[in-house]
Amino acid sequence: MRRLFPIIAALLLTAGCSIAGGDDANGRTTVTFRLWDERVATAYQQSFSVFEKAHPKVRVEVQVVPWADYWTTLPTDIAAGTAADIFWTNTSNFGLYADNGKLLPVDFTGDWTKSVVDLYTRGGRLWGVPQLWDSIALYYNRDLVSRAGLDPAALTWDPTVPSDTFRAALRKLTVDSAGKHPGEAGFNPRSIATYGVNAALDQQAILWDFAGSNGGTWQSGDRFTFADQPRTVQAVRYVVDLIDKEHVAPPAADTNTDGEKALRLFTQGRIALFQSGPYHLKSIQEGASFRWGIAPLLRGPAGRVGVVHGVAAVASARTRHRDATAEVLRWIGSADGLRPIAAGGYAFPGVTAAQPAFVDYWRTRGVDVRPFLDAAAGTTFPAPVGPRVGAGGTAYTPILQQVFLGQLDVARGLRQAQDAGNAAMRD
């Protein structure tokens, strides 16, 4: 999850200072555990406190490396043999380490979310213990939506229908500083007070979901296919037009390199509809001063189709404490081990038995998270996987940024992006 995603007691690392576990003066074995999310680290600290009472000879040291640095420090530490004994990974990055013998396979089973197990199974073996999962739904500002007389759950999008209900709703929800809506005389797209939606180059929350709900694909085997798929090209053009032609979403110049810009605008009451995952629940709860809710993912020509993604914990093959590392893995693969994450409302846990605690946390706060559960149980769109898919994404992202800025035609830009991504995956 990008994101699934950035405590007091956690150790904040900077590049190059990761140290694998060792033995302390009290004869305890220290197992290091690395992740990128400071909020979730709080729950892990609670979990490991319970674990250490039952395993007095093992100490778990939590290390937090921010997302911005995580994927640059990790390869360096793995190559040097100084990676943490256990660390978080996502589907874009684990395949290369699994194929190169850098990880230990998981040799036990658990009550885990099947979709996450499938994501981390490669070569017939499971390489990660599921920790978190997320799907995509539609957050909405109740006041703005009610004022416009809209039902977010009833919205549909269709790139072949200029007046589909989604675009029509976004025009109602978007207003400039003079109170004008898109299509009205005098509307000023350079002075917008409230945007309709967070259309942006956000692959997990926006791009892949629109591609999937239009019947398109992004990848086949170890190749990107998005430029070869007319329905994917059609979906990307639809999203780009919401920004550059319809002016119902923030400019790409504001969101291309600032992944949290749209979130801030939503919590400030300046975006009415915010398509995203449960990884933003806490930020919205803490930042929004208005009434908000969660509606199902938009229905497209192919139905409601969204991405289900997951984070797994993997063990370094170079750990010096295999037995202790295995014990910690078993613990965070259990309901008791992940319950603090669920009960604290941080994320849907990878252990299904702990899931009700997450649902209950938000229900007691007046938030119904069922749209996320429904999205995960419905038709889903696969996030890219493979040993070099991370390199591919790095190669094509600058080209997609030009597409969203309106500097490249959509079809031409997607072709260039696909070629660059596939070339990077072959290198």
Image (cartoon, rainbow, N blue to C red):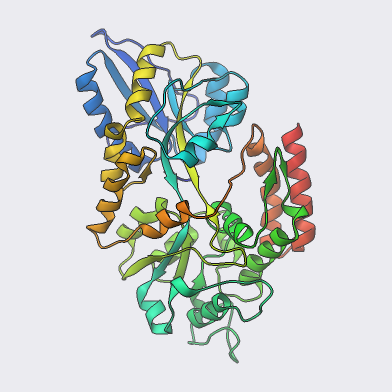
Which residue shows up at 55% across the image and 70% down it? 249
Image height of 282 relative to 57, above or below: below
Residue 335 lies, in percent from the top left, at 30, 34
**Drawn side of residue 192 relative to residue 141, left or right:** right
Residue 305 visible from this viewpoint: yes
Residue found at the far bottom of this picture = 185
Residue found at the far left of this picture = 53
Residue 339 lies, in percent from the top left, at 28, 38
Residue 50 lies, in percent from the top left, at 22, 27
Which residue shows up at 27% across the image and 11% down it? 28
Instruction: Give the quarter of the image for residue 44.
Output: top left
Q: Quadrant of the C terminus?
A: top right
Which residue shows up at 61% across the image and 69% down it? 243
**Count of numbered circles in the view:** 0
Residue 258 visible from this viewpoint: no
**Drawn side of residue 354 relative to residue 273, left or right:** left
**Drawn side of residue 213 relative to residue 111, left or right:** right
In the depicted view, which residue is nearer to us: 335 or 139?
Answer: 335
Instruction: Give the quarter of the image for residue 344.
Output: top left
Which residue shows up at 67% across the image and 52% down it? 217
Image height of 148 relative to 368, above or below: below
In the depicted view, which residue is nearer to us: 202 or 268?
Answer: 202
Residue 184 lies, in percent from the top left, at 58, 90
